[in-house]
Image: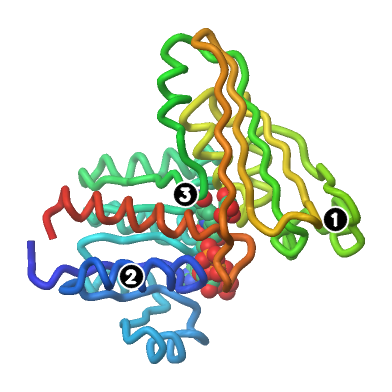
């Protein structure tokens, strides 16, 4: 492995910045670059002292050893296949996009063509090893409930489904499959993909999304029933200060996945 190693972060928003800060501390010899919109490159390069690119091909020409996606579904579609085809390992946070079979196929083919590895994080959720284990004996139902304050749903399709600003009580504004949730709430429901992939899949995982004016944090509950018995996973996550939609644990999960990958690659 070349010294110093190079790590590229797609997206320098709340999660990207949190990851950059944490990874710099833990990988002090690594060089960092990021992908962002053209109009933010100058400011973000100054603020982070990392090299900024607005073009994926130019970023990949910088020859990162690892790419970390913290940008959103469109970045997974637009940038990740090219990275994988070039043989660069990628860690993605926006795994809800895998609910689109065409995207999943493109990513699998790209990884297979070069032998690069795609890592999908558990993100703002956890404990899914128990669901995976239960699957071996058969699971009858998986129900995920995501509860966030109204501010965390602003700018999402929830705005058309309930009166976020006027809520006095918690409201379930969406009930459907993980596939529909991940597609309709791309910035809020990536966790439903993690649950779906660990368990009964995108179509059979039942999702309820809730806007709760009394909630201060982002909470995630998974109830599973199967031959093994029953299990309940509950997480109560502090949001990142820069983006109430995104839990700090999701950014920490990306860092943990990167550190594991770095250990395997050897930088
Ligand atoms: N797995 C999980 O548990 C979680 C996953 N996530 C995923 O992580 C993503 C990032 O979260 P967060 O940092 O809070 O979001 P932010 O909106 O704070 O930051 C994302 C940044 O990436 C930029 N960006 C998006 N697409 C591109 C692109 N194609 N090229 C260049 N820049 C791009 C955005 O610009 P612009 O705003 O102009 O598009 C924005 O500046 C979320 O969208 C979500 O998909 C988030 C939380 C939990
Ligand atoms: O961070 C969270 O709490 C969950 C989230 O936004 C997502 O799954 O996209």
Tell me if residue 72 can be seen.
no
> Residue 243 at x, y = what percent?
60, 68
Q: CA distance from mark 1 to mark 3?
A: 26 Å
Q: Which mark is residue 57?
A: 2
Q: CA distance from mark 1 to mark 2?
A: 37 Å
The secondary element bearing badge 1 is classed as helix
Element under disc 3: loop
Instruction: Tell me if the residue at label 3 has its CB under 8 Å from ligand 1.
Output: yes
Other residues around mark 1 within 10 Å, as few (<14) / some (14–19) / many (≥20): few
Above or below for 86 versus 125: below
Q: Which residue is mark 3?
A: 123
Tell me which label, 1 or 2, sits earlier in the chain.
2
- The x, y position of residue 247, in whole percent, is 55, 58
- Give the residue displayed 76% in from the left and 46% down from the top: 210
Q: How is the image coloured?
A: rainbow
Q: Which mark is residue 160?
A: 1
Q: Nearer the viewer, mark 3 or mark 2?
A: 3
Residue 53 vs residue 106, the one in the foreground = 53
Where's the C terminus, which quadrant? bottom left
């Amino acid at each position: 492995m070349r010294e110093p190693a190079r790590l590229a972060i797609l997206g320098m928003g709340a999660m990207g910045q949190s990851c950059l800060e944490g990874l710099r501390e833990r990988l002090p010899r690594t060089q960092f670059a990021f992908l962002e919109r053209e109009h933010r490159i100058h400011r973000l390069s100054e603020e982070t002292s990392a090299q900024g690119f607005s073009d994926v091909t130019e970023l990949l020409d910088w020859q990162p050893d690892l790419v970390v996606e913290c940008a959103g579904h469109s970045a997974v579609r637009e940038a990740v296949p090219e990275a994988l085809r070039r043989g660069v390992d990628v860690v993605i946070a926006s795994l809800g996009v895998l609910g689109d079979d065409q995207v999943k196929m493109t990513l699998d083919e790209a990884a297979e063509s070069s032998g690069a590895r795609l890592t999908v994080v558990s993100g703002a959720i956890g404990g899914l090893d128990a669901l995976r284990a239960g699957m071996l004996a058969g699971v009858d139902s998986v129900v995920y409930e995501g509860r966030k304050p109204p501010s965390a749903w602003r700018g999402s399709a929830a705005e058309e489904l309930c009166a976020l600003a006027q809520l006095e009580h918690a409201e379930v504004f969406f009930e459907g499959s993980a596939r529909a949730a991940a597609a309709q709430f791309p910035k809020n429901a990536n966790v439903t993909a993690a649950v779906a992939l660990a368990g009964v899949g995108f179509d059979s995982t039942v999702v309820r999304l809730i806007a709760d004016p009394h909630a201060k944090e982002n909470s995630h509950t998974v109830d599973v029933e199967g031959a093994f018995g029953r299990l309940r996973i509950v997480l109560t996550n502090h949001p990142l200060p820069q983006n109430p939609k995104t839990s700090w644990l999701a950014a920490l999960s990306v860092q943990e996945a990167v550190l594991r990958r770095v250990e395997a690659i050897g930088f």
